[in-house]
């Protein structure tokens, strides 16, 4: 079966690269992936694969076997990242490899269809929007995605310092990850009479210092940092009554994240109070830490070893990054999960607009996932 899959993928190498090139050329922000979704759905329908819309831009491709068996899912995220050019204009780039993930998801199910490898059960490829917003998975779940899944695989290209091309692992050990926006309210006044006002920027600065001084157990991976601050207006002689900061938070496990979030809230409230201001804290996103199933990891490891050789099967890879893939496990605790960490010689790193990787990873990822799913459903 491995040789059959490899030959089928190699036969379509040019088509797979063309799919990636087309998707790379139409990057779109979360919940705005209309061109991306239309392109992928057209490719699926051309191959005779049924498509079910779940949200405006999120959908599921499905193949059903003729015998009873499990329903195995593959999550492929499809959104891109926003950046600003020198003129201050927003533009979008696939700087996290989601165009590659979508390509691999598409060609995994196309390969399984072409070879007629789904005999028992079902395969569902979940094309998910808004992973970068860390809310897309939850939106899909609330709309019914995942209701009938028994197993679910995720995937992500890895930077070169995690895995080289031709290497892969069965689990990416994500941290819990979250973001908050804090609005500080003070009192406006003339710059010549600061005693009559409350400077909201001072409150934001005090909160930032407090966040920089907080601690959790150093044996665990965690962080909290201010990533944006905005306050004041056009006039330079007005004490500003409003300032806003955003905060990125990460924790090795959900308990650590709860501790970090509690201390961040305290730092913001007390930092504001120290100068007579108030702080309103809004949680923008929060995703749980990873949790995988040994049985499903073992199945993925067998596929990795078959395609790349056992010497290129890596141990699970830890990362301080987060992924909303794990919302599926929270929503469905009995769901069996694994996550393909795919070496791609990716440089200089994820979320860099100049990110690039070796396109050979597209073929490798498709071969591994098609084999892993076929092992369960053939």
Image (spheres, rainbow, N blue to C red):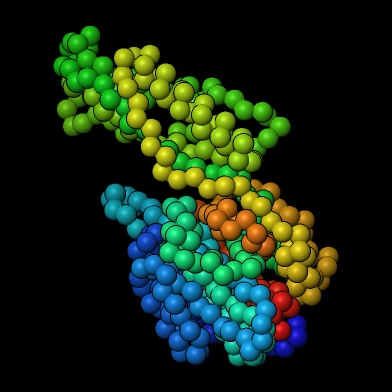
Up/down of 112 relative to 362, above or below: below
Residue 25 in view here:
no
Q: Nearer the viewer, residue 138 or 128?
A: 138
Q: Quick check: 108 left or right of 301?
A: left
Residue pushed farthest right? 311
Q: Tell me where residue 189 sits by quadrant.
A: top left
> In x, y percent, where is residue 302?
79, 70
Q: Tell me where residue 56 sits by quadrant.
A: bottom left
Q: Tell me where residue 59 sits by quadrant.
A: bottom left
> In x, y percent, where is residue 270?
42, 18
For the N terminus, the quadrant is bottom right
Residue at figure coordinates x 34%, y 14% from the top left: 275
Residue at figure coordinates x 21%, y 31% from the top left: 233
Q: Nearer the viewer, residue 87 or 307?
A: 307
Up/down of 242 relative to 199, above or below: below
Residue 103 in view here:
yes
Residue pushed farthest front? 68
Residue at figure coordinates x 71%, y 32% from the top left: 219
Q: Quick check: 209 left or right of 73?
A: left
Residue at figure coordinates x 31%, y 19% from the top left: 277
């Amino acid at each position: 079966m491995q040789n059959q899959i490899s030959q089928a993928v190699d036969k379509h190498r040019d088509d797979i690269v063309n799919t990636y090139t087309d998707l790379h050329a139409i990057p779109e922000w979360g919940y705005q992936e209309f061109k991306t979704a239309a392109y992928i759905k057209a490719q699926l329908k051309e191959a005779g694969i049924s498509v079910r819309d779940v949200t405006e831009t999120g959908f599921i491709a499905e193949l059903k076997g003729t015998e009873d068996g499990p329903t195995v899912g593959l999550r492929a995220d499809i959104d891109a990242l926003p950046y600003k050019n020198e003129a201050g204009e927003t533009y979008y780039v696939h700087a996290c490899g989601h165009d590659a993930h979508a390509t691999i998801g598409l060609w995994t199910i196309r390969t399984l269809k072409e070879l007629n490898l789904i005999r028992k059960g079902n395969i569902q490829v979940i094309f998910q929007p808004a992973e970068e917003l860390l809310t897309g998975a939850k939106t899909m779940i609330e709309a019914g995605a995942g209701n009938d899944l028994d197993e679910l695989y995720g995937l992500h290209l890895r930077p070169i310092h995690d895995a080289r091309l031709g290497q892969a692992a069965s689990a990416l050990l994500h941290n819990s990850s979250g973001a908050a926006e804090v609005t500080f309210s003070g009192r406006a006044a003339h710059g010549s009479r600061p005693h009559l006002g409350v400077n909201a920027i001072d409150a934001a600065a005090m909160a930032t210092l407090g966040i920089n001084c907080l601690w959790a157990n150093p044996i665990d991976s965690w962080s909290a940092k201010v990533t944006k601050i905005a306050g004041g207006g056009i006039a330079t002689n007005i004490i500003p009554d409003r300032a806003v900061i955003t905060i990125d938070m990460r924790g090795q496990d959900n308990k650590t994240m709860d501790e970090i979030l509690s201390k961040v809230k305290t730092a913001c409230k007390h930092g504001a109070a120290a100068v007579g201001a108030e702080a309103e804290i809004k949680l923008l996103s929060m995703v749980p830490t990873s949790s995988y199933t040994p049985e499903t990891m073992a199945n993925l490891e067998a596929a990795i070893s078959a395609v790349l050789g056992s010497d290129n099967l890596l141990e699970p890879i830890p990362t301080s990054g987060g992924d909303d893939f794990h919302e599926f496990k929270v929503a469905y605790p009995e769901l069996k999960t694994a996550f393909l960490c795919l070496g791609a010689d990716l440089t200089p790193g994820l979320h860099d607009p100049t990110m690039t990787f070796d396109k050979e990873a597209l073929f490798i990822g498709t071969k591994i996932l098609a084999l892993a799913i076929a092992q369960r459903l053939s």
